[in-house]
Image (cartoon, grey):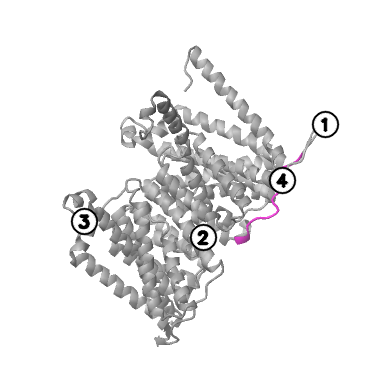
Amino acid sequence: MPTAGPAGSIRRAVWRLRLVFLFAILAALPYLLSYSQQEIAVLLVINVLLVCSYRLLTLTGEWSLGHVVIMGVGAYASALLAKQFGVPVPLSMLLGGCMAAAIAALLSFPLFRMKGFYFLIGSFAAGEIIRLIWKRFTDPFGGPKGLKRIDPFPNIETGFLSIDFYEPVNYYFLSLVIVSASLFVLYRVERSRIGLTFHAIHWQDRLAESVGVDTFRYRTLAFVIASFFAGIAGGLYAHYVGAVNPTRFSVDQMVYVLVWAVVGGTTTLHGPILGVVVLTVINEIVLRALGLDTARPLIYGAILILSVLYLPNGLESLGPRLRARWRLWRSGPAAGGGELA
Amino acid sequence: MDLLWQTAVNATYAASYMALIAVGLVMIFGVMGVINFAHGELYMLGAYCVVFLYAQETFPFLLAVAAGLVFVGFVGVIMERTMFRPLRDNPLGGLIASIGFLLILQTLAVFGFGRRMGHVPPSTQGKIEMFGAVLTYQRLFVVVAAILLLAALWVFLKRSKFGRALRACAQDAEAASLQGISMNQTARVAMFIGAALAGVAGALTAPLVSPTPYIGHSIIVTAFIIIIVGGVGSLEGAVIAAVIYAFVHTFVTTFFDGVIANIVGLALMLAVLVTRPTGLFGARERA
């Protein structure tokens, strides 16, 4: 938290500088990548939004297994609105997000009667029902084959500026803008009174209730906001790839989101981002380069087990841990071997 | 009328192997408090034991089934020792670790046997007919084995000293260890039994289902529905819920279609979760 006073303003300036630096790297990045890597970068940016919106829900202490299906609701809604009703694509994405939020609001009535493990299973059941409905009803959802030839994001054609969003580089920048804006909103929500209440519900739900917090309403709020942004991620995905199908939003995909969040850690906003970026780079670039295509799930599984066993607070805890160890080592080499929590 | 009988016979068969799987999952959850997401893959592993020993190496079918039971049981013991024991006070961690283990088992099965369906020839061709319904010996095998195994488990849990210790751990681990019951040993045995039941279910049904490395997915979904409907932590509830679910699912599949049956099953689970989160037969709350 930036504090007032000169030290606070310096810290804030440093923080801003870091942000500018980060965006400079992100802007330069696509020009250093090959075409197929650019395509991966687009999906990675979309997945960042997916996993960060998931984190907002986990702030209240509930872990859902339906988040990817909610993303699918956004994708299907946006695709259908554009295909069948001719809604312009940017608007349809927004409406897709609203649809996802509405479905979440509806699901919150049965789901938030449960907590913990029961919520996990309940969200899985609810999501799976939605997914099976897509699979069963060919009209309008396209059945097991899903929807194809979804309208792409409209190209911008003005006198001096023309942007073709079929190019991954351009779609990358589009997603980057939308995702950054969404992350900013998510950040503000977490830092607001509402976000603090989410934390309170997570750690002390009985206490929060006893001081007059309606935990059901706040849980619903977290679920609805998280689902809105998952829906936006779904819209971005649908109009980029051009096709959606029920398998794309199955529980296997949900497992990946869970893994990103757990491996990255969920106490900070950058934790899940770290998780998705590191694991995607390992998965798509390192393992692919090593030619270990069939072994990829195996290595993913091993990483998952090892990180739960040896890095229970996620990658985000690695930095502070190493820093503390470094400080200890500098202050007295004799104490350097001490174990740090 | 014939169709009705036949569907009932099919449902009985489905209920028996589902009960084996669900009871194993409940055992693991009851003693260790961890949701074993890799349970469907343990079933898959049992099925591949039969693919390997019986279909490829032509050992006798029953021997292959027994080997599947023991082998998968020991895989369970390894899971307990390497993952669930260090993560005992971290249920979410245990769940995540079991997801990791699931991915490893799936990939190993792909390495060993390929992605395609494994074909297992039936071990007998015989069948019995009653009231116009046909029950092949292969399916009868599964029903009889399930009844025998579950009865043996029941006797073990209710009559033997170790079974009593195991139930004590499931009720209150701390109080049980105060009485001198070794938590580690109990967890190991529970994990062996739980995994072995999933493995034997896979081994017995291998000739009937054509296993693939990804078969575990539908199995774990079914098992979750059953243990929720039966009440998490209740072994009797799991058996009764397996029967209910198998009949509902088989009848809806026969008279409508498979996807509708899955939707009905999930809706049943959701309804139980909303109205009676402890399940139809579970008495106590367990967070």
Q: Are marks 2 and 1 in contact (CB under 8 Å)?
A: no
Which numbered mark, 1 or 4, is in the foreground of this view?
Answer: 4
Q: Which residue is mark 4?
A: A35
Principal secondary structure, stretch drawn in magenta = loop
Q: Check disc 1 and give the amino acid type.
A: Phe
Mark 2 surroundings within 10 Å by alpha-carbon count, few (fewer than 14), some (14 through 19), many (20 or more): many
Q: Which residue is mark 1?
A: A160
Rendered view: A30 above or below A334: below
Separation (CA) of disc 1 from disc 4 = 26 Å
Q: Check disc 3 and give the amino acid type.
A: Ala
Q: Check disc 2 and give the amino acid type.
A: Thr
Give the percent coordinates (x, y) of residue A336: 38, 30
Mark 1 surroundings within 10 Å by alpha-carbon count, few (fewer than 14), some (14 through 19), many (20 or more): few
Does residue A250 appear to the left or right of A116 in the view shown? right
Q: Residue furthest front?
A: A334
Residue B19 visible to the viewer: no
Residue A129: in magenta span: no
Which numbered mark, 4 or 3, is in the foreground of this view?
Answer: 4
Residue A145: in magenta span: yes
N-term mark: 1 or 4 = 4
Q: Are marks 4 and 3 on the same chain?
A: no
Instruction: Give the magenta-colored segment's residue range.
Output: A144-155
Give the percent coordinates (x, y) of residue B137: 40, 83
Q: Tag 1, which chain?
A: A
Q: Which residue is mark 3?
A: B168
Q: Which residue is mark 2?
A: B107
Separation (CA) of disc 4 from disc 3 = 60 Å
